[in-house]
Structures are given as C-alpha cells and as structure tokens.
Amino acid sequence: MSGHTRAVVAPEYGGPEVLTTVEVEVPHPGSGQVLLEVRAAGVNPADWKAYTGVWGTDPTKLPIRLGHEAAGRILAVGPDVHGFEPGDEVIAHRAPGAYAGKILVSAAACVHKPPAFAWEKAGGLMVGGTTAFHLLEATRVAAGETVLVHGASGGVGSIAVQLGVGRGARVIGTASPRNHDYLRSLGAEPVAHGPGLLERVRELAPEGVAAAVDTSGTDEALDASVALVADRSRVATIAGFGRGAELGVQLLGGGPGADPGTAVRAAARHALVDLVIAGKLDVRVGATFPLEQAADAHRAGMAGHSSGRIVLLP
C-alpha cells in the first residue's frame, strides 16, 4: 500500500511563513517498518528550531520534513514486524516527518495506544512525556521527597508533575497564577515565578527541596534551584544550557553538552502508556490545527500562549 500523501516541509530557512504542504511519495514499508495513517501529530519546539536557524542553516538539509511524534492507525506492515498488524492503533516516537497524512516508521518506535485515549492526547504524549520521565530519573526523585518543577504547567512540566506525584513525592510547581488551579488539579502546590520566587518556595518548604527540574530555561529557575537543592547532581534542565553548565547541574536533551538519555526515553514510552491506562497520567491539549495550518500552530507555540499541548490533526 504505497502512494502519495500530504506532508509539511520547510523548503528554506526562516519563520513559520516558509512552511508549505506538499505531496510526497510513501513507499511500501520495508523490513521492520509499518505504514501509519496519522491521526494526530504533536507540535514541539524542536520542530521550529529545525528551520528557524536555531540549529544552523545547512542548505544540504533542505527541504526539511517536520514532526517527531504521531498517533495513528497502521495501514500495512513490512517484513519482520512482530506484535503489530494492520488496523492497530499506535503511538509512534520517534517518528520523523510526522506532520503528514501517512508516514513510514520503525515498528520499534511504536507502542499500542490505550483504546480510550483520545487521538489528540496520544499525538502529544511522547516527546513531552519521555523528556519528563528522563528529568525525574536523572534527579532520582523518590517517595517522600519534595521536588520543585519549573514551568510546571507546560507540556513537559505538567507531565513531570504527574510523574512526581505518582512516585509519592511532594511537588511544588512554578507557573503563572492563571495556571495555579490546573496545577492543583494535578496534585502540585503552585507558586508564582518571578521576583521573590526563592522566598516563596522556602516558605512552602522550610525543610528544604531534594531535587529540582527545570523546563523553562530561565536564570531565575536555575539560580533558585541551586540555592534550594544541596546536591547539584539532583538539579536538571532541558532548556537553560548556558547557565546550567556554569552552575554544574545536569543538562538533558538536545542541547550542547547535554545527555540525550536515548535508552531512558525509549524505555519510558511503555511506562507512560501504563500510567495512562491506570488513570494516573493525562495530557492537556490547548489547541488543535489542521495540517495545512502548521504555520499558525508554530506561531502559537512560539508565542507560548496555549495552555496545553498543540497538536496537528491531519
């Protein structure tokens, strides 16, 4: 079952205005591959960093296919695929080129989607979820401890909160006041970021904070973290690489000098799905866009105004 499909590409470097939807060929699935009909594709900062120049402007990489995670239905399987068959509903990560109607992905990148889990939630689970899982593993968050989550209402932060609560930790989360009720609903104690953050956290946790995870990348978040947490190996950031390196905290993800945590993140996919099935993990979707409006989705993501994940629905 091959043919053509719509896909979002960046034919040149620039802002979201360069994005366009084109017809691309979809080959038959090869050994170990499945052909996926995409029902939802998560939008992540890595997607726009690829074409806006943040990661360089190598002309040999053009045109750039976009997207890293998807949820969909398997249309066909290639040779040597075990455990999946046509009709199965799956979540795929890593799924290069996920902004498309159909994609070929490795069967090893797929996990079965919980039947009651909405497509748009499933499409936005894995990039944020595996990152959050890596943060908590790296900082060794355990039951009975207090952990501080910076950017707690965001795509990664909100899952880190739920994972921390699930581990039996006390979670303090920074967010704008408009998101404090949301954090309480996840089981966190909210605190406003901005001037006075350190004092506000100390007031909430006079006995101290065991670990801190930063999804915001601000100097404020990192400086407060090292002031509160005695052991800098229990502070980790996925965004503040410059300041984080100066302070000697853990750098995780795709930044300079960061630990990508490939094995940890791959293993996390099954754990995340198990938590969803158990009713202990949810994804808040803030906005959905059709494939052809990927540029608008990216503008919304760059502005940071969406209270929840942004997802494309092909």
Image: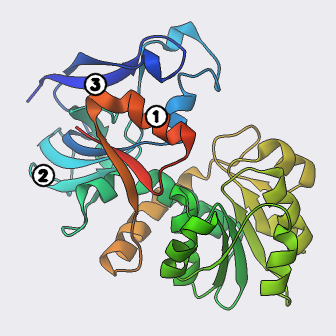
For disc 2, the neighbor class at 10 Å (few under 14, some 14 to 19, many from 20) is: some
Compared to residue 172, the image places residue 58 above or below, namely above
Question: Nearest the camera: 29 or 134?
Answer: 134
Disc 2 versus disc 3: distance between alpha carbons?
24 Å
Residue holding disc 3: 7
Sort mark 1 into few (<14), some (14-19) or many (20+) by Cα contacts within 10 Å: many
Residue type for callout 3: Ala
Q: How is the image coloured?
A: rainbow
Tag 2: amino acid: Glu
- The quadrant of the rendering that contains the C terminus is top left
Q: Residue at x 33, y 51 (%)?
A: 123
Asked whether 216 or 287 is in front, the reply is: 287
Image-based side of 129 in relation to 289, left or right: right
Residue at position x 54%, y 80% in the image: 184
Q: Amino acid at mark 1?
A: His
Q: Position of residue 201 (x, y in %)?
A: 80, 77
Q: Which mark is residue 298?
A: 1
Does the rendering let one see residue 180? yes
Q: Between tags 2 and 1, which lies in front?
A: 1
The Cα–Cα distance between marks 1 and 3, rounded to whole angstroms, is: 15 Å
Q: Earlier in the sequence, mark 2 or mark 1?
A: 2
Q: Secondary structure at mark 3?
A: strand
Residue 163 shows in this picture: no
Q: Secondary structure at mark 1?
A: helix
Mark-to-mark CA distance, 2 and 1: 33 Å
User: Residue 301: image x %, image y %?
Assistant: 50, 41
Judging from the image, what secondary structure is the residue with disc 2 in? loop
Q: Which mark sits nearer the N-terminus, 1 or 3?
A: 3
Residue 34 at x, y = what percent?
21, 41
